[in-house]
Amino acid sequence: MTIQDVIEEENNLYKRKPPTKHDPNFQLHDNQGVPLNQGETFALEIYNSEIEDNDDENSDYEREIQYVEVFESPIGYSTLSGALRYGSTFGFKIVDGVTYLTYNNDGYVCISPDKDYPEIIVELEIPPKERRVYIHYADDGNILLSQWNGNTYASCEWVSTYIIYVPGHVDRSKIQSCALDICSTFVDIDLETFDVSAKLEEHKYFIVLDKDYFLVYQKQHPEGVKCNYQQRNLFMEQMRYSDVLSKWNDIPSKESNGIWSYERLSVLYFVFRPKADPSKLSGYSYYNTIAEFYDTAEGEDFEKFAEIARTKDSCVSHFFVISRETTFYVVDTSNPGINYKFSTALGNKIIRNLTFKLATIQDFIEEEKTLHKLRPTTKRDPNFQLRDNQGVPLQENETFELEMYNSRYEDSLKEENRDRGDFDHVEVADNVHRVYIFGSADHGAVFGFKVVDGITYLTHNNNYICASSGETHIETILSPELPPKERRIQIHYAEDGNLLLSKWNGDSYYYCDWIKVSYGEFISDYPEFTLRWGEPVKLIIKRV
């Protein structure tokens, strides 16, 4: 892929981005094109092209119509989600010329304040501008939603709903819970009248509980497969995608006394139920788990959880996990005072290392003590001065290239015939919609700098290098206007004299995520991950 390919791809992506210009004549209308009035109510059906393309009135697609449903939570947010066969009733209000979708007349549909995982929720107050939901019309007349001035349209991440049948002789209170119970429907049945064949016509897969095991039914297993309760979460993940008995994630399964299990022990999670999002109870750290749920913040008791953990059989015994939305703790079962807090970005790495005893909780605690040395300093140097690779100060009218320092090239400095082509450069790609910078193995752009109110800004063609707006998927771009404080890029000097970049008052330095051999993206997201495993970009100033 060439730089021109990247530019063309960006051009195509731009066409799919929401317009940021507000239409002062915007009017909401129904699926027949008839304008709606304030006070009228309606359902929101999720458009499905498969339904549209099927003309058979008796088609199975008829019962697969998808709607927007409001999931009302007594604790936390009421969130919008997709649902089959039923939906909530909505309305709208116009306030200061802006159209807001509403729920129950006094609830405004808006973006949650959660920066890591923004959702579409309902709140009683009119949302601030940055959390508004913007309504657009697609070319086919259907509605699209985006964050106000957002870069992408809202999408629906469909989460499988598991059907679990409970015969009369099974006491659910004695069955070990798992994380996927949060998105499961439990149905009481009479085994004498229960028709497996009929249910397999209705569902691709389902589970029937028994006292000492549960049975997984799939079309390839109409007789049912007996499985171990300790790994029910893993078997449920497996049956979503393939034969429940096929190899899963390199974890071999085995049969003993007619009951299937996996050869790796499960990890015990304590999950805060009000903030448990089914779409995020996935990934390596959640697959092979058992779970206990708690319902209030006051119920989060490490000592009590440790006592429960010590009673569990057939799971990892030396630690357990507390899951509170996007915040996690790993806790030493024998000494809960030894615990470590981490974020979603670190989950898979930490859980894997602890499970396989490649590290201890104390190792992560000790590591944390040294991480502050790797974080950018937030204190600004009032005497900061930009210098070239020879240590000579630069003047504002001078131009230069930015080479990307790589320690593996340091050794080549000793070679008499060092290949200058081995150095990577900072390049600028320009299209009609946006100018952005990235790492390139081919050649580099020419840069300069400006000092405004004592702050040094890197520039290119009199445009300021800054961070794009938003909290995630942040790009390094150019702006003709002086960027606001939260979008500034701060320049630091490493001990070896090379430049480091960070967001203003950011938690980690920029690193370059090499997407292809020839180019990579400058990244500032996921600072906790970057601090541990991302190598910061070091830049060398070469005068032109």
Image (tube, helix red, strand yellow):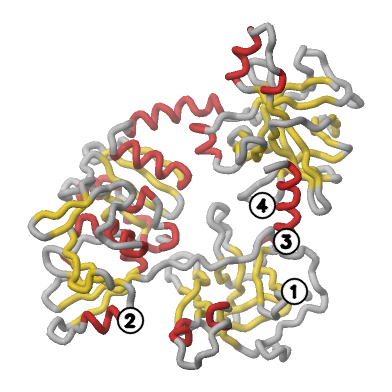
| Real-space Cα separation, disc 4 to disc 2, in angstroms | 43 Å
Residue 310 shows in the view: yes
* Horizontal relation, residue 290 to residue 210: left or right: right
**x, y percentage for residue 416?**
68, 6
In percent of the image, x 66 and y 61: which residue is there? 152
Relative to 348, say whether 116 is above or below. below
| Real-space Cα separation, disc 1 to disc 3, in angstroms | 13 Å
First in residue order: circle 4 vs circle 1:
1
- Give the numbered dot on residue 149: 3
Query: Could you say which quadrant of the image residue 208 lies in?
Result: bottom left
Q: Which residue is mark 4?
A: 470
Q: Which residue is mark 2?
A: 202
Secondary structure of the residue carrying tag 4 is loop
**x, y percentage for residue 176?**
21, 60
Secondary structure of the residue carrying tag 1 is strand
In percent of the image, x 50 and y 65: which residue is there? 157
Relative to 541, say whether 36 is above or below. below
Secondary structure of the residue carrying tag 3 is loop
Q: Which residue is mark 1?
A: 98
10 Å neighbourhood of mark 2: few (<14), some, or many (≥20)?
A: few
